[in-house]
Amino acid sequence: MSTLEVSPSDTLPDQSIHPVVNDFSIQIGTVNGSGSQTANSVLMRSIFQMGIPVSGKNMFPSNIAGLPTWFTIRASKHGYIGRRKEIDILVAMNPETAREDTMKLPTGAAVIYDEPLKLNELRSDLHFFPVPFDKLVAPVCPDAKLRKLVRNMIYDGVVAQLLSIEMDEIHNALLKQFGKKKAKAVELNWGAAKAGYEFAVKTFAHGVPYRVERMNATAGKIIIDGNSASALGCMFAGVTVVTWYPITPSSSLVESLIGYMRRFRHEPETGKATYAIVQAEDELASIGMALGAGWAGARSMTATAGPGISLMSEFIGLGYYSEIPVVVFDVERVGPSTGLPTRTQQGDILTTAILSHGDTKHPMFFPCSPEECFSMAIEAFDFAEKFQTPTFVMTDLDLGMNNWMADAFPYPEKPIARGKVLDAEELTKQGGFARYKDVDGDGVGYRTLPGTNHPQAAYFTRGSGHNEKAQYTEREDDYINNMDRLSHKFEVMRQFVPEPLVTVPEKATIGFVAFGTSDAAVRESCDQLRDEYGIEASYLRLRAYPFTQHLLDFIQRHERVYVVDQNRDGQLLGLMKLEFEPEILAKLRSLRYYGGLPLDARTVTDEIIRQEGK
Amino acid sequence: MSTTVTPPPKKLNHIGLEVVQYKGSKTTLCAGCGHNSISERIVEAFYDLGVNPYTVAKFSGIGCSSKSPAYFLGLSHGFNGVHGRMPAIATGALLANSTLLGLGVTGDGDTASIGLGQFMHMVRRNVPMIYVIEDNGVYGLTKGQFSATADLGSTLKTGIANDLPPFDCCALALKWGATFVARSFSGDKKQLQAIMKTAIAHKGLSVIDVVSPCVTFNDHAGSTKSYSYMKEHEEVLQDLDFVPFFEDISIEIPEGEVRDVQMHDGSHLRIRKLHRDFDITDRFKALQALEETEARGEVLTGVLYLNTSKPTFLELLNLTDQAVATLPESKVRPSKAVLDSLMEELR
């Protein structure tokens, strides 16, 4: 039993006369493994199809069946897609969490719940909508085995009725969900949704103080999770070797990729694959294979998360020192150690920047949206081959596994660029080559691929000390020259990484620096600060590491700059500390959130107000 | 006055290369190290069979053995990776370019200790490559600690005895899926050469465990991986004769009971049984023979198993015939129409 205190307040005023339109969030509490995903996706999609900006966040356990799961749908006519802390409508399906979920609601919220839970006894300041789910599901789903799965669709119908969501759109969303081939599933679920709708029409005299009204803000847009977007980017980047080891939350990236590649990357004439995807025995092997493939000329990649990144560290040092292109996706989750595998964090950026022993530095890209997962995946492959080095795309569970509204992805404009690779013809023209010689002044040598039919093509790749000709050496000057060239190469990268996006309002005194999934919360917070507190804030969204001059310029033109990190120790700020002068650092403040949920604007705003002393 | 000296005609193999073109840089290993003999056998085998060195990719891990790819096939690309993790690198390179001939050289520390997991998974996948274990029972480069192939009761130079049983890499390879498994001795020139050639002709994974004495740290009395121990305890399974595909097979078949195995490339391995009744297609017999000889303190050498029909890992992946690594953009970037249709699905 829950030990929550019950503190009923006065009876509710009737708010249904002036309902809030297209600005609310719905939380659905279920048990994982109960098939609620379909009902939740359909509900989210139906609102999207009515033209209203919408976002969905799945908070799920590291478990297959039987533990609490929450799904939050936010509709926002303003286009805010970050998490919102306040819940307006609760759908309580899980007896284990229903009471606690109900007690947390703000006054005036609505609760749709399974009738036997008797949640209406808890508080009198909420709108309660009891629904006899078991009674309603039986007639629409004669097969008792399927009832558990179909039962959830009933709340879609109830919510649709209470919020004025068009039932046609629920039906359209079901068709989208199951496709034309699964007509039976569509029919069963549609029957359940209708039963819920009709029950609500008959039973509830008053609606909820929220309404959905058609808008036109989603035309042409798509709904996709970040991992699928990354996968699409990899396919259109021309990836040829993918080696991986399953780990939450990165597994679905490669699983999506497998699906896409099977459909679109087999030769039509022969049916043969133009790629290899291999599930390795562990992360040591997955990165080792990816490096071997990159060395042999493939566009190779792996995808992983925290523990995998730790395991890959030795091989990444080899990739850095022997200069092999490979793209690593790190879909970050909460660390340290196993941490919270199904919660989100930006917890790996500091360790990844200098992953492996000795002096190493690695470029990282920070996508903030599905659009950028797609475009940066493509850029990352070009970048890795241009600079012949492991290149990291840092996303997180929130971006990778949640469904986001996004613009349709544009087809890549630039042709694939494979970097400095010499073939037999070029070798003859140049009379040979030295693998690690800085011919062009950018720190990047020319390489050859095994299998090149030329007497001067071969060289010996090693993680031990080597000179320009890739020969073994322990000489002081050879070592220093090589390490300095690698450092120079990293400096050159600053001109080629994705630039930050900067917004500077005229009267801004403070600024934000944030990256990745902090974006939605920070943009919304800028509006809150302006509208509620009269504070104008600038915003630089960092899109890559190493940093560029834009970041320094941005810090210099502000009195105080808040560096937003979704981790305990302020890792982005830490990276800045490694290279900035003290007078620059003196302007920096740290704003951190590390509870494992997607960052929300209110948390950001409240923290700014606290630190600004207002 | 000038006396014209005609140089003797250079000896060339069937693709027109000299043996020197199969050599590498000068070895830096100890004089008398078994690994140097293995390097020589690799040079001879690749030269004799006329393998195009540009199609070979050499791989190694870390340790004395793993240095040796620098000492042979200097015209081939080489990759000296991290300790115990060479199988992953080699697998990746072969995924990228399935037309390469992969040649891995590694040690017992690399394979049986730190890299045991990767070794086993390479075996399980039947990755099409040659995997040579230069097995001396000790860590040479860190100056003489036991490895996991050191025999129970064998001693270090300091007199310390090994109290753990060894991994038998051939038994592991046999049990879990390698398609050519052999054991040899670095001092047995003829046998090792025939085995090396068979491995070149074999289309699947070849695991060759070569007892290769460490003259500095493990060649004393009390060692079971010394030259003298091998001379006394080697039990040779067969007489091996390798006939490459470009030679006339009809030449005389040697006397005695001879089994002729045709390899994937048309070469032939001719096997004459010596002492025991042994069938190279029977994995269980091979495992049994290894157990029996180990119990007697003997070392069984020769071809333990050969399976020429099992599909390789790359065949299972249904890869296009060309190397995927260098496919043109038209083959690896789907069209705009594909992207547009995918976007429509997501609307």
Image: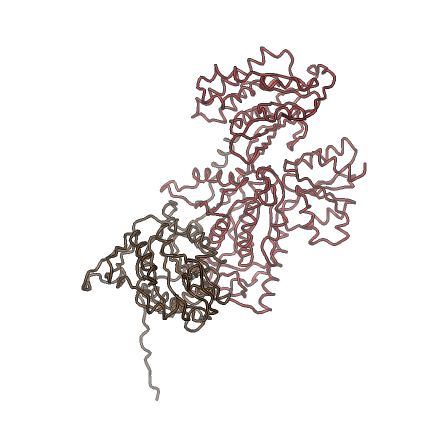
Count numbered badges in the picture.
0
Q: Which is nearer the eye, A559 or A215?
A: A559
Chain A shade: red
Q: Is residue A176 above or below residue A389?
A: above
Instruction: List x then y, in percent, for residue A258.
Output: 46, 40
Instruction: List x then y, in percent, for residue A21.
Output: 67, 21
Instruction: List x then y, in percent, for residue A206.
Output: 65, 13
Furthest residue in direction bottom, as rendered: B1
Q: Is residue B168 above or below residue A80?
A: below
Q: Is residue B272 left or right of residue A119?
A: left
Colouring of the image = by chain
* Image-quadrant location for residue A425: bottom left
Instruction: List x then y, in percent, for residue B8.
Output: 31, 77
Furthest residue in direction right, as rendered: A614
For image coordinates 61% across by 53% down, the residue present is: A354
Q: Quadrant of the C terminus of chain A?
A: top right
* Chain rendered brown: B
Residue A253 in sight from this viewpoint:
yes
Q: Is residue B54 left or right of residue A38?
A: left
* Image-quadrant location for residue B60: bottom left
Q: Is residue B60 above or below residue A508?
A: below
For image coordinates 30% across by 67% down, the residue present is: B190
Residue A425 in sight from this viewpoint:
no
Q: Which is nearer the eye, A465 or A342?
A: A342
Q: Quadrant of the N terminus of chain A?
A: top right
Q: Which is nearer the eye, B100 or A406?
A: B100
